[in-house]
Image (tube, rainbow, N blue to C red):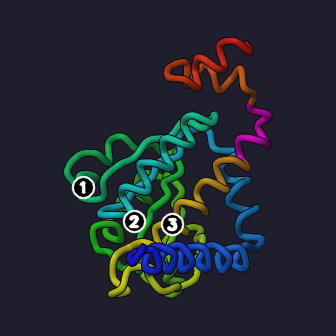
Amino acid sequence: MKYLEIVIDVMNKEMQAIKSLIEYVNEDYEIIIDEILNCKGKVIFLGVGKSGHIGKKLAATFASTGTPSFFVHGTESVHGDLGMIEKDDIVILISNSGNTMEVVNCIPFIKNIGAKTIAITSGKESKLGQGCDYALIYPKEVESDHLNLAPTSSSTMTLVLGDAIACTVSKLKNFTSSDFYKYHPGGSLGEKLKTVN
């Protein structure tokens, strides 16, 4: 029982971060949702470190809920993986600070391809926040570890923000359980959907 206070403190910090995130929701979300709904290409996530891991998860969520999507690592992008990006795509670049050079340095090359860029960051005035076509800004909250260093609250807000956009787009596309089954026929979820469809 002696460790539970720490566990609960971490959970409370992340819960507070999500509550703060909700207060940041504004008309920019609607503009970006419209861009994604009208996208003729793919929605590509780009990041490094913990932001990259969140980007991979969000790409998987978008793909499984009806929006073609994949992840590109920021460092690998400038070593040939920019070739995966086309002019009709939207690239969502993730960096908590908004100044992660491996991410920021990609912006001019992506724009040269012709793809649209969306930042997800807490740094409204950062290079990423100012350099992309659109930006989804989340609040600067304390990280939930005892050092206030490990990406925890910030990565949770990024995940929740991305999930909210993905689920909204999916609903607006009238994505059904039959559609979901097309992309997720495996596992217990696939078996469950199989009996319904």
Count of marks placed on residues: 3
* Outermost left residue: 79
| Boundaries of the magenta span | 169-175
Q: Residue at 75% x, 74% y: name it.
A: 26
Viewer-proximal residue, 97 or 2? Answer: 2
Mark number for residue 15? none
Q: Residue at 57% x, 34% y: name it.
A: 64
Identify residue for label 3: 156
User: Distance of mark 3 from mark 2, alpha carbons?
Assistant: 24 Å
Q: Quadrant of residue 67?
A: top right
Percent of width and height locating residue 11 = 53, 72
Mark number for residue 107? 2
User: Distance of mark 1 from mark 3, alpha carbons?
Assistant: 27 Å
Q: Pointer 3: residues within 10 angstroms few (<14), some, or many (20+)?
A: some
Kind of residue sitting beneath label 2: Ile
- Mark 2 vs 1, N-terminal side: 1
Kind of residue sitting beneath label 3: Thr
Q: Is residue 90 visible?
A: yes
Identify residue for label 1: 78
Q: Mark 1 and 3 residues: CB-CB less than 8 Å, in contact?
A: no
Secondary structure at badge 2 equals helix
Q: Residue at 63% x, 36% y: name it.
A: 65
